[in-house]
Image (cartoon, grey):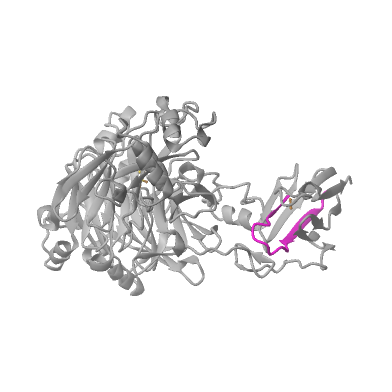
Amino acid sequence: MFRWKNVHGAVGASALAALLLSACGPQAGEGDQTDAALRPPGNGNGSGSVAELMAARNLSEDDVRAALATYTPSGGRDEYLIFASGGHSGQIIVIGVPSMRILKVIAVFTPEPWQGYGYGDETDALLASGARDGQPLGWADTHHPALSETAGDYDGQFLFIGDKANARVAVVNLKDFTTQQIVVNPLIQSDHGAAFVTPNTEYVIETSQYPAPLDGAFAPIEEYDEKYRGAVTFWKFDRAAGRIVPEGSFAIELPPYMQDLADAGKLASDGFVFINSFNTERAWGGVLEGNPPLESGASQNDMDYLHVIDWRKAEALVAAGKTETVAGMPLLRLTTAAAEGVLHFVPEPKSPHGVDVTPDGKDIVVGGKLDTHGTVYSIEKVKKLIADKNYAGTDPYGVPILPFEEAIRGQVEIGLGPLHTVFDDKGYAYTSVFLESVVAKWSLADLKVVQKLPSHYNVGHITAAEGDTVSPDGHYVVAMNKWALDRFNDVGPLLPQNFQLIDSSGDEMRLLYDLPIPIGEPHYAQMIKADKVTPIEIYTPVGTNALTHAVDPNAVTGGKEQIERREDGVHVHMTAVRSHFTPDIVRVKQGEKIHFHITNVEQAKDATHGFAVGSYNLNASIEPGEHVNMTMIATRPGVFPLYCTEFCSALHLEMAGYLLVEPK
Ligand code: K7E
Ligand code: CUA
């Protein structure tokens, strides 16, 4: 009846488990627990026996088993961390596994008030650096986070994420979980195959989605075939500096197909990048003009093209100066890429979506979307076809096409709408099947499905423990569901997304937990062993700027606080410590510019202070040892309380002062 060995987390020997085994008989509730039957744990039931609690809440043994596999006592730590895209919020969500507790929201492309992100000089400038052609952007459509890798393994140092709507990529430092950089791609107007990294994080890959003229210029849509293009950008990453270096980056021009997801080869396929495409029909809509809508125009062909890119060869051509500079970016032209063997196509069934390289790098799995198969390409075969120049033809842009049948190892019949695939340590792949709302587990060796687990509902991406590395852990899979329907209390017409934690350690997948995500649609996430990430606990030395990770030139030490009038305005050199600001009274004249330089001089973990001036949109979060700079112009006269916004001590409410703006 029980299969404790399938439950990850070693609960079998616990006293609670023993009690459960003795206390409860067989239960009916296999599989889904319907919400209508659940009763809250209150009403004194929590003090009864486990059997009584189960009966009172109508919990099955499966429910209790799942609870034991995820419950993390107070003070307990999680074994894995998920870094999930925050979708439309433009942020990143950090989630502990197996508890599924949300641990942090990392502010990336949008302001985050609690962290004071977007309310001070440095983070204002960082967000402003993400403007496109001077247009400030108030949101992002974040899709794919990518952890930095060393030798194909997550190394826990950096995190990257792409913004589909505005073709941007951001760099997050996992030393303090803060965003360091936003780069705007000058060549393309939207991206999707972003961010993905090469096995040693030499490059962060960003591929366009919707074709447009590459120089950002206008061209009539009727000139789509001639003037519209896609591109893949290889952003050079300088690990020591923790920054993308635009000067060392390059791009490759691609035909005006809609390039979709990307993955970097590793081990056997090291040196390659694979990018899916759809709309090789080059349809562009125009429903009022007598054209078919894009969705049908783009779905005519039985095959689209998997792009196989030899990035080391491209790198060598760039070094040899075989590029043109377009929009400030060295660009390898399509004709050069095709002629020099940088770019090859392999047909792929019909409007594919996910492309995922297996842990050994030998196979590339493509999800069919409008096909029921997962197609498994063999890099060995692909390499041989390329070496032999064994082509089935060329596309209209002269790109050689490899013969489909000779490039694949086989196909696996998965179901309706396979999208994304992740891997475990036992030779299994897990594919999200959108239309069928299941996670399909299949064997890489014989390409046979062994189990389908219902998801709730419409699973999009899927992530696995260390799943994109050369050595996945195999413990957990998370289905990232687009629809939640009947899973949670109703909260109006816009429902949360639903992350479902699945135990994948045993022979059969088991559903453990549902986590609603209420801030956007997180397309993708990566899951890393928690002990690989070793963030700092406080900023040291005192006065460190979180953006530069160096002592700020304006850092203030105790005893050196002062208010100084300079040519460029009033400089307030301030310290924060439990429970006062020094200075606490700031007197200025209407119209003066004020520069606040505030150092939290504390070195105690978690001793954060906030700093706010109401009515002036000033808001900082100053972590222990951190220094922030904020600028304002005292346009309106009056008396403005300034105060600490974090309940930092018993005398937190007294951690306050005044900004006095005297009328002219
Ligand atoms: Cu499938 Cu942007 Cu990876 Cu959405 S994408 S799910
Ligand atoms: Cu410092 Cu409240």
Q: Residue 64, located in which quarter of the rendered image?
A: top left
Residue 176 lies in what quarter of the image? bottom right
Q: Give the residues in magenta.
A: 590-611
Instruction: Using the image, determine if residue 624 lies above or below residue 42.
Output: below
Residue 479 pos. (x, y %): 35, 43
Indicate the quadrant of ligand 1 in the picture. top left
Tell me if I can see residue 308 in this picture. yes
Residue 565 place in picture, x, y as percent: 84, 62
* Residue beneath the point at 18% across and 56% down: 377
Q: Is residue 186 visible?
A: no
Picture coordinates of residue 462, whole percent (x, y): 34, 47
Q: Is residue 227 left or right of residue 391?
A: right
Front-most of residues 653 and 505: 505
Which one is nearer the viewer's eye here, 652 or 292? 652
User: Within the magenta stretch, is there residue 605?
Assistant: yes
| Residue 18 drawn in magenta | no
531 w.r.t. 67: above or below: below
Q: Residue at 76% x, 59% y: name it.
A: 577
Figure check: 341 above or below 26: below
Quarter that holds the N terminus: top left
* Side of 420 where 392 appears, left or right: left
Residue at image location 31% in from the left, 44% down from the top:
223
Residue 268: quarter of image: bottom left
Name the one closer to the observer, 582 or 303: 582
